[in-house]
Amino acid sequence: MASKRDQAILKCTECGEHNYYTTRNKKTHPNKMEIKKFCSRCGKMTVHKEGK
């Protein structure tokens, strides 16, 4: 049986660093994720977008 979850890598929109790895449900969230998280390189809260 195929998994309904997809691995996602979250990338900071300001500096471009790959900071977080997470999973998302492909069926309920078909679009790319966009979450506000802390970036250790920038030292502040920034928007992180899913990138592959």
Image: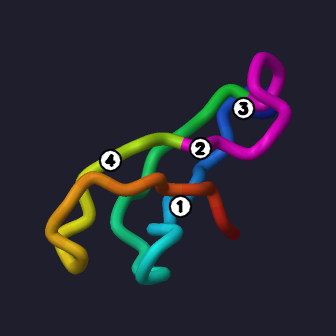
Residue segment shown in magenta: 26-34
Residue depicted at x 68% and y 26%: 25
In primary-sequence order, the first of circles 3 and 2 is: 3
Q: Which mark is residue 37?
A: 4
| SS at circle 2 | strand
Residues tagged 3 and 4 counted as in contact (Cβ below 8 A): no
User: In what quadrant of the picture does the N terminus appear?
Assistant: top right
User: In what quadrant of the picture does the C terminus appear?
Assistant: bottom right
Q: CA distance from mark 1 to mark 4?
A: 13 Å
Residue depicted at x 22% and y 79%: 41
* Residue type, label 3: Ser
Residue corresponding to mark 2: 34
Residue 25 vs residue 29, the one in the foreground: 29
Residue corresponding to mark 1: 9
Residues tagged 3 and 2 counted as in contact (Cβ below 8 A): no
Using a 10 Å C-alpha cutoff, classify the residue at mark 4 as few (fewer than 14 neighbours), some (14 to 19) or many (20 or more).
some
Q: Is residue 47 left or right of residue 34?
A: left
Q: CA distance from mark 1 to mark 3?
A: 17 Å
Magenta stretch prevailing secondary structure: loop
Q: Nearer the viewer, mark 2 or mark 1?
A: 2
Q: Is residue 24 left or right of residue 30?
A: left
Using a 10 Å C-alpha cutoff, classify the residue at mark 2 as few (fewer than 14 neighbours), some (14 to 19) or many (20 or more).
some
Residues tagged 1 and 4 counted as in contact (Cβ below 8 A): no
* Residue type, label 4: Lys
Q: Nearer the viewer, mark 1 or mark 3?
A: 1
Q: Which mark is residue 3?
A: 3
In primary-sequence order, the first of circles 1 and 4 is: 1
